[in-house]
Amino acid sequence: MAPRGDDPTNGPLIVGLGGAFRPGSATEMALTAALKAAEALGARTRLLGADLLIRLPIFDPRSGPADPAQAELLEAVRSADGLIVATPGYHGSLSGMIKNALDTLELTREDPQPYFQGRPVGLIVTADGWQATGTALMSLRAIVHAMRGWPTPLGAALNVTGGLFDDQGVCRAPRDTWQIEQVAREVMEFARMKRTAS
């Protein structure tokens, strides 16, 4: 049910960007759960998961017009009122697949609203251990700042050791459910404030 005042057919568009090469990854499941939480708050959502991200060529600023996968990424980000970015933590930072997607957004540099300018960006990191969740989250937050986005106050740091989700796709620990849903809430709050101010 959409909150009072939101038109469920015209709620803020929240784009989820993330995942990992492995099908059914904990990262993409966490991102999907966050988008579902945003939908419950009245959002329209769009998932840009691994099936798109693995088709992106390595970003080369010397290349010509965007290829179809790049064009799909650019169109989705340009239309977003807010975003949620989810990455696995690899060797203390975000994955190369996610970094390549973020680098590709350099193609928006001449836009009236380049990169993530003026939009909330929720952050989710999954990793096999706490150290990588913290360092990857710090890296991702710095990248979003550099791309002129507003990272949400809470970034979800999810330790997948022992399994993050059960067989029904539900977080095993209530604290992880809370983190994922809180990221969605904060993105929605910022997106609504931006719409009201526009």
Image (cartoon, rainbow, N blue to C red):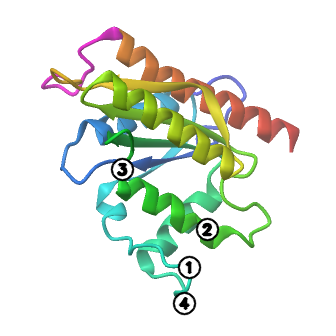
Category of crowding for the residue at label 3, using alpha-carbon neighbours closer than 10 angstroms: few (below 14), some (14–19), many (at least 20): some
Category of crowding for the residue at label 4, using alpha-carbon neighbours closer than 10 angstroms: few (below 14), some (14–19), many (at least 20): few
Q: Is residue 20 left or right of residue 82?
A: left
**Pointer 1 or 2: first along the chain:** 1
Identify the magenta region.
166-174
In the displayed structure, 90 sits above or below 1; it is: below
Quadrant for residue 160, please give it.
Answer: top left
In percent of the image, x 25 and y 35: which residue is there? 26
Separation (CA) of disc 3 from disc 1: 20 Å
Q: Residue type at mark 2: give it.
A: Glu
Q: Is residue 10 visible?
A: no
| Disc 3 element | loop
Mainly helix, strand or loop, the magenta region? loop
The residue where tag 2 is placed is 106
In the displayed structure, 179 sits above or below 17; it is: above
Question: Badges 1 and 2: C-beta atoms under 8 Å apart?
Answer: yes
The residue where tag 3 is placed is 95
| Disc 2 element | helix
| Disc 4 element | loop
Quadrant for residue 195, please give it.
Answer: top right
Residue lying farthest top? 174
Tag count: 4
The residue where tag 1 is placed is 61
Residue 151 pos. (x, y %): 63, 36
Category of crowding for the residue at label 1, using alpha-carbon neighbours closer than 10 angstroms: few (below 14), some (14–19), many (at least 20): few
Residue 168 pos. (x, y %): 17, 25
